[in-house]
Image (cartoon, rainbow, N blue to C red):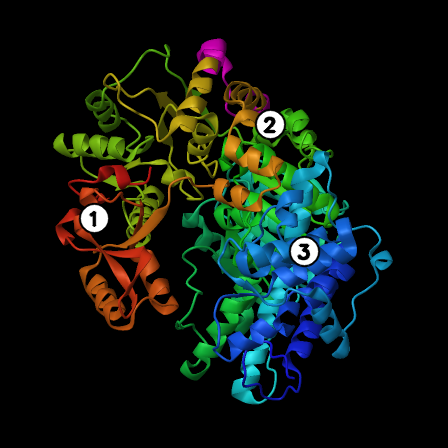
Amino acid sequence: MEYLAHTSNSVGEVDPLKSHLRLVAERASKYAEAFDASLEAYIAGILHDIGKYGDKFQQRLRGEIRGVDHWSNGAWIALSKYQMSGIAAALSIQGHHKGLQRASKSSLGDLDPAKLEINNTEGLVLSEPDMRNLLERLEKDGLELPAKEQIGKSIYKHSDDSKIAGMLDIRMLFSTLVDADYIETEAHFNAQEKGARSYSEPGLKLNPDTLLEHLLGYLGELSMKSGASPSVRKMRSDLLHACLAAAENKHGLFTLTAPTGTGKTLSMLAFAVKHALHNNLERIITVIPYLSIIDQTVSEYRKALASAIDARDARRYVLEHHSLSGIRGGKRAVDGVTSDDEQEFHQQERLLTENWDAPIIVTTSVQFLESLFSNRPSACRKLHRLANSVILFDEVQTLPIGLVIPTLATLSHLSERYNSTIVFSTATQPAFSHLDAHIRKHYVRGWNPREIVPEELKLYERARRNRARWPQDIRETVSWNDLAKELANDAHGQVLCIVNLKRHALTLYDELIRMGVEDVFHLSTNMCPAHRQEVIKEVRLRLDKGEPCLLVSTQCVEAGVDIDFPLVYRALGPLDSIAQAAGRCNRNGRLEEGEVVLFLPESTEGENIYPDGAYRQATEVMKILLAKYGDHGLDINSPRIFEEYYRELYDIARPERKKEDLLEGINLRDFVKVSESYHVIEKPAINILVPYEPAVFNELEEEVRKAGLNAKWITKARPYAVGLFKPGFDDPLLSYIEPVPLGRDSYSEEWFIYLNGEHYSLETGLNPPQGMECLIG
């Protein structure tokens, strides 16, 4: 009897199931060597498809029956043979088709074949009710399970004081099984096409010794060519050397706290490369909260490392992974890759991204953190790559306050158990250590990172390139008309004004235009990236030439935009937002002192003047500090002020009491509930192709209607897309958008085409007459 793994037509394999089980077990075991769980991974690999030896599964292959459960058999054998030491393997086996479920006695007990024969809640028939038959067939094929005594200490610690840690341990083991299964399954199907198992080319190696030499050479050249003042260049040099010195520490938790404009992006990369070299780590993962600066970071990395990497390998060496990276299928044009090679190249890039098999990965907070708390095979597949890695988090102050405690507890365990280094980088470092006692309730190590930048460097004092002018009274508000007059009459001629909401930016911009003010520009994410880049390019040109320029912007200008105004106005908001705005004032230190003016915009009774409740709460804390210290004592260049701000915020917001559904899921060890509850962005978003450049829009619209959504099209469409919150079923906005076709009679839920060109302004971007509540920010 031939026990087939996936198909009744197998080429080049006499016993395809036997081969599949052995190869998956060996590959998973190899992955798990990184965290001393190779034997458990091997067990999971051998048992994950053992149900396919069952008679019912053979009937399904012949088309005689449907709906066969072939995974519960292996999970139950793992539990029966290994008891507590088999829990992680059992959940991984059960989850490789349906996702991780719940690590509770009752949930695991439901895997009992006797129960499943009577009541299978999914309406499936069990592949084989008698486990002895399966084990005999496994043994007949020459495959053996290790003795229970060989396991020793399981990867999973089932105790009440380490539930978060235990759930991560299970996900890591699960990751090895899922990735191994996907790779060997693909090789099996390749064998049908090519006559022999065929594997995709593995990812490149980091080679940090070579990388460091070339990176430092690039940074030296960059410093010599810099147009910044000598004092700013010296600060950037000092930060770089502090990062290189700290890199010689052993793996662990770090913070990198430095003012904006001091070159954190590449200094942090230098830390990561040297740290990987010093600690024999395998990859670098950079996590960024904003899609808008992913491209910029990837571009900086590739440019900085260009001399160390073959140009043909640049995309495989620095791999980007996010919702718009366009690697789900299809092919796209790439410089240096011939059309004949494109499909194979992008298939390989897609595979590398699915399991993060690359030396440097740049991804989003959403992709990284939600995968870390997911239960789905596709999301968890890459997690085993986090072992022996340097993981860099940029702009960590953006971490939602309700997720802080479970996230930090998980990252702390990831660092300690899996030999990884975590770096939290920002100009406005949150006082996460203030939450250490709450974090310790979930993970005993808590959160006590080492700061990379020595206090004696006094970077914030040296970076004092502007002064803040605060409202004299926190009840003192200014109308948009009066603010427009003040901006228009400013003697500098070059002013940036940042507001909290898109509608405020539109209102202020309209006031300035109505008053006849010239040289006024608008910037917000209502404008597609190509449009925003054109505005930023024009603004920079005017600033360099000393020409008049008045830019009205939302917070999007604070996220990684290198722009330098002598005068910045900022609507009162959270302290970290104010500090980011100040980083756009006299950024390169060309003036003796720039000025940042804070103001409170007027509002009608009941009007919501902040993006969300957390933002409003943080602004109220800012008002408390302003009332306490007054105009002269509140120094946004003082780390002490940031420490007090965050302590006050945490005391008021009580993050340990937020996200009760998430905390309940963790308490129950319920992977499904945790996955459903952990969201970095609560509201789902969609991408809208907008008619910024009508000719390009028409070409992209025609192309996607003919060929359907694919990676090549997404790559070309990204610069011309605007992100919106997903509208409700009765939202008027739905009448103006149309979903992009995926294929015959199927449509995307993430990509849409905007149908009315009159609603896109070359000054302010997308402004639908209705449905404004969908506009993000």
Front in this rendered view, residue 486 or 609: 609
| Most distant residue in the right direction | 149
Name the residue: 65% across, 62% down: 73
Q: Are marks 2 and 3 in contact (CB under 8 Å)?
A: no
Q: Which callout, 2 or 3, points at the residue further toward the start of the chain?
A: 3
The residues tagged by marks 3 and 1 sit, at their Cα atoms, a distance apart of 45 Å
The amino acid type of the residue labelled 3 equals: Ala
- Callout 3: helix, strand or loop? helix
Mark 2 vs mark 3: in front: 3
Is residue 627 on the magenta stretch?
yes
Mark 2 = which residue?
431
Mark 2 vs mark 1: in front: 1
Q: Which residues are magenta?
A: 625-642
Mark 3 = which residue?
90
Mark carried by residue 734: 1
Q: In terms of image quadrants, where is residue 317? A: bottom right
